[in-house]
Amino acid sequence: PASLDLVLLDDTGQQTGAWTLSLADGADGATRVALSESATVKNPLLRFLRSFRNPARRVDAFLIAAAAQLGEDDATPRDG
């Protein structure tokens, strides 16, 4: 498996999160793409507001867009 780690920085250069993109061989000969996100939200109000939305929203949108670019019809994000 191959992976790519991306570090997210704010305007001051402080790390605010990271994305890890992994590629692995699937059981049916296809390539399995996995993306995970970790983030640090210091502002307690923003942390509270973010708790009301799907935490995987950005990751799912990225994977669906990548699948569309690659011509994949079945682009259903799955946990795990």
Image: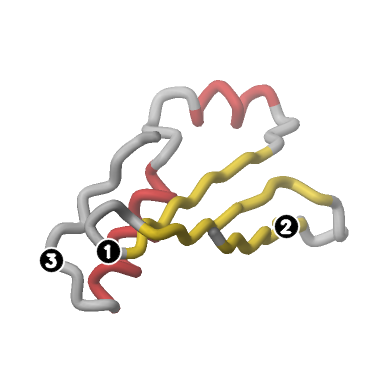
Q: Is residue 72 above or below residue 51?
A: below
Q: Which residue is mark 2?
A: 7
Q: Give the residue type at disc 3.
A: Asp
Cα–Cα span, label 2 and label 1: 30 Å
> Alpha carbon of mark 1 to alpha carbon of mark 3: how far?
16 Å
> Quick one: quadrant of the C terminus?
top left
Q: Which dot, 2 or 1, sits closer to the camera?
A: 1
Write the residue at 57% across / 63% down. 2
Q: In the picture, residue 47 is in which quadrant?
A: top right
Q: Say the numbered circle drawn on residue 29.
A: 1
Name the foreground residue: 4 vs 54. 4
Residue 44 image position (x, y, % from top left):
68, 23
Q: Position of residue 23 (x, y in %)?
A: 47, 61
Which of the two residues, 51 or 59, is positioned nearer the viewer here? 59
Residue at the image position 76 percent from the left and 57 percent from the top: 9
Q: Nearer the viewer, mark 1 or mark 3?
A: 1
Could you say whether the residue bearing mark 2 is in a helix, strand or loop? Answer: strand
In the displayed structure, 6 sits above or below 77; it is: below
Distance between the Cα atoms at labels 2 and 3?
30 Å
